[in-house]
Amino acid sequence: MKAIFKVFETAIDKINKYSLYLAAIFIFLSTFLAAVNAILRFSIGAGFPWSEELSSYFVVMLVFIALPNLEYTNRQLSIGVLNSFVHNPTVLKGIAIFRGLITLGFLGMLVKLGIDITQKAHMRETVTFVLQMPRFLLYGTVTLFFVIAILSWVIVICKKGEFKNAD
């Protein structure tokens, strides 16, 4: 059982590591597209209408792509008031597990809703405004990273509240 858990943990480690690289690529592409579009509009008075939409999608997607890693390494935004008052490591691990269980509940609801909206977008064949990209791909990607965040929290909880060290 421990060997299976170790394989599972290693897989989630790698997914979380490479998801940050993907998020970094998305922020670079978003910045690049916005800069090129601004330069073109300033210099020749016209830009690419699709670049604004794509740039926005990159920024939104990078947030959801980075979410599992931030949760897994305890770098997600959270209220640290308890951490400043509580110095007992056992109590802090208990707080982390409690926070993980609450987060699992919310992420579970988001996955359920994400699956529902992805299916509806696929059935209705909805597309984005300018790029005409199928929306179910965007919704499905976000839902996938919610699932990865759930799996990351399962590992943290199974390790009794110990987060992965940020590399």
Image (tube, rainbow, N blue to C red):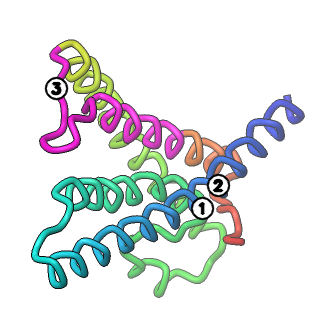
Q: Check the image and report above or below for 142 versus 114.
A: below
- Is residue 95 visible to the viewer in this orientation of the structure? no
Three-letter amino acid code at the position of disc 1: Tyr
Distance between the Cα atoms at labels 2 and 3? Answer: 29 Å
Instruction: Describe the element under mark 3 as helix, strand or loop.
Output: loop
Distance between the Cα atoms at labels 3 and 1? Answer: 29 Å
For the C terminus, give its image quadrant. Answer: bottom right
For the N terminus, give its image quadrant. Answer: top right
Badge nearest the viewer, 2 or 3: 3
Three-letter amino acid code at the position of disc 2: Tyr
Mark 3 lies on residue: 126
Q: Check the image and report above or below for 4 versus 122.
A: below
Query: Residue 113 placed where, x, y %?
Result: 26, 29
Instruction: Describe the element under mark 1 as helix, strand or loop.
Output: helix
Mark 1 lies on residue: 21
Local packing at callout 1 (Cα closer than 10 Å; few below 14, some 14-19, many 20+) is some
Three-letter amino acid code at the position of disc 3: Thr
Q: Which residues are magenta?
A: 124-150
Find the residue positioned furthest to the front. Answer: 44
Mark 2 lies on residue: 18
Mark found first going from the N terminus, 3 or 1 = 1
Residues at discs 3 and 1 in contact (Cβ within 8 Å)? no
Q: Check the image and report above or below for 52 versus 28.
A: above
Q: Residue at x 49, y 61 (%)?
A: 23
- Is residue 109 visible to the viewer in this orientation of the structure? yes
